[in-house]
Amino acid sequence: MYMINSTVSSQMPGSMADKLGFGFVDTLTGFKWIGNKAIELEKKGYNVPFAFEEAIGFMFPVVHDKDGISALVVFLQLYNKLLKEGIKLGERLEQLYSKYGYFKQCNGYYITTPAVQDEIFNCIRSTKPYPSHIGNYRVNSWRDLTMGYDSDTVDHLPTLHVDPSSHMITCKLLTPNKDEFIRFTVRGSGTEPKLKVYIEAKAENENRADISDDKFTPKSKKKSTDIYKVLLGVIFTIGLFYKLFVHGPSPNETQRNLDASFNAESHVADTEVNPAEAMVTPPDQMNLAENVEFYDLMQYQGTPEGKSNEEIVLLLVPLRNAEKVLPLMFRNMMNITYDHSLIDIAFLVSDCSKSDKTLEKLYEYTSAMQEGKLVPILEDREREIKGKGVFGSSDLYLKYMPEGYIENVKKSYAPPFHSEYEKPFRSIQIYQKDFGQVIGQGFSDRHDVKIQGIRRKLMGRARNWLLSTAIKPYHSWVYWRDVDIELSPADILETMMNFGSEYDVIIPNVWRPLPVYLGGEQPYDLNSWIESNEALKLAKTLDEDDVIVEGYEEYATWRAHLAYIRDKNGDPNEVVELDGVGGVSILAKASTFRHGANFPAFTFLNHAETEAFGKMTRKMGMKIAGLPHYTIWHIYEPSEDDLIEISKLERRKRRFGKKH
């Protein structure tokens, strides 16, 4: 039998394993490591009844992942057993501590820059092989998962995965009692300005473990962070923990030490961590009422490792008269490879015509998708449409699309599906709110220059209503996505997140297919652009409430459009910095909106909605990444002129034959 937990979690299961004779192993952080290790051990014939990662979740044999339901069932079974035996939960926990040792943790982080993180770890590694002491305390062992070193193994190679791209060092201090230990891990996030510290100690005496977390929270003074002060601050925290935990002074002495250390004007621990920007645990958090919740918003910043860090994404989709394209939208959503259990979806249905059934179909499709039953429904609908076999006036254009176009679309959504395809999403919310939008949904209606300013301000209102209603404190990313995207890479979220270390907003290039007689393909999104001097001069000639409509000859801005920078063979990782943003596909850090950015429903710097959002974020000092060679495809919607031309081609065919 084995128990498993992540390497930064409590080592109490290891103490249990030593006394009871079963196996124990730790892994890197994340349930992908824990789950895979359980599978590996089970294939070797071992039973893995329990695994966990502190503050994240628990795993039981029911599923190789964190699962709150099975954890609750096991807890209730334990509670029922103890209840029958007349033992309270606190008493049972005390029995475990008495038998396996008292464990105490002190976790947190310091705000630093990546450059300072590099220097700190290089400083630690500068003594070969590694420092023998930390301050006045002797080190018993070192493990460096960046360099691939472990002093406890025969060959000095760590058993855990080595990752040269991220810093992670673990150290154990020598203690007077061989049955006690102090173990700390320091790691840099790599994408956020944080140096994370995990400290745990084991003692055989309860009195020496009775120290509250708030005593280890350094007080703040707004000073710049210096590399040596941060490093000394970490060492000081470890040393103080060692002294209080292992040597166990009297309560009065403890308080005097703490008062002197944390209130001394010259002490490093008095200057390092700003509680407003750090992972601070409220002193009485464990005593919060059930209807009181605490969120440290610094934990929901959005990082390039969003998937492995299990960051929750809010996917937002505004809908209007979208009944016809809903199946395509759901195919696209199911095809997303980002863990569906980390995606909340919110729809806003507004201003639909009386005959439209967007809301009814949305109810049907979302319920079926969450139950894993949507694919058969969509396949039945597709067979029904195919069975009619007649082209109507609205879909005649399909006969004129590039060769293989229809087949390529079908192949994109045909089996085999990836493992996430039919998994339910974390949650789905449907909102309904009308805004008085009376402009038609036809291509010509929506793209008429005369109504663009009015239309976009109404769309800005809709976006802001949806965003402000749906966003929660635990969301790290917000992904805006149009309903009528036709083709999109399944890993679009992971790909765009890769640029999150430098940029706050990331957007792909958007093109659309065309009938052959129109050229086969065309840039679609002209709202994503780089500002030009000509456009700035144009804005000065306009009234304050006038809206520049990009991509129309009435407004000659001479801006560089993301769409026209595209090279079919270009590097998909190439980035250009943008000033304007189109709304087809926008990935933004949730902090962008928490800082106050939105989609202006008024004229902002002579723009509105998404383009004004771009202007606003740039004005606030944020950065927008455009990916010119990473392309998604919007559906082709024939304009009135296109339909007229297609009808002419059809008449010519009937009159002269297919050759004409």
Image (tube, rainbow, N blue to C red):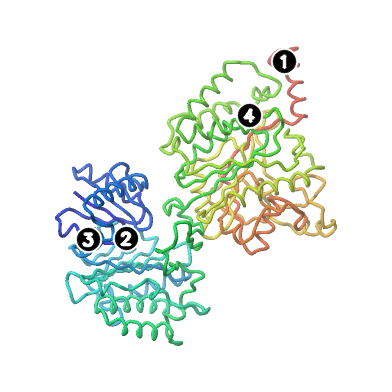
Name the residue carrying label 4. 324
The image position of residue 190, as x and y in percent, is: 44, 63
Q: Determine crowd level at label 3: few under 14, some 14-19, many 20+ residues with C-alpha closer than 10 A.
A: some
Label 4, secondary structure: give it.
helix
Q: Cα distance, mark 4 to mark 1? A: 29 Å
Q: Is residue 236 above or below residue 150?
A: below
Question: Of marks 4 and 2, which one's residue comes earlier in the chain?
Answer: 2
Residue 207 lies in what quarter of the image?
A: bottom left
The amino acid on which the numbered mark 3 sits, given as a three-letter code, is: Leu
For the residues carrying marks 4 and 1, which lies nearer the camera in this image?
4
Q: Residue 653: which numbered mark, if any?
A: 1
Q: Residue at x 43, y 36 (%)?
A: 418
Q: Residue at x 81, y 59 (%)?
A: 537
Residue 170 is left or right of residue 615, and the answer is left
Question: Of marks 2 and 3, which one's residue comes earlier in the chain?
Answer: 2
The amino acid on which the numbered mark 1 sits, given as a three-letter code, is: Lys
Q: Cα distance, mark 2 to mark 1? A: 72 Å
Q: Is residue 318 above or below residue 360?
A: below
Q: Residue at x 48, y 41 (%)?
A: 425
Q: Cα distance, mark 2 to mark 3? A: 17 Å
Question: Of marks 4 and 1, which one's residue comes earlier in the chain?
Answer: 4
Label 3, secondary structure: give it.
helix
Name the residue carrying label 3. 96
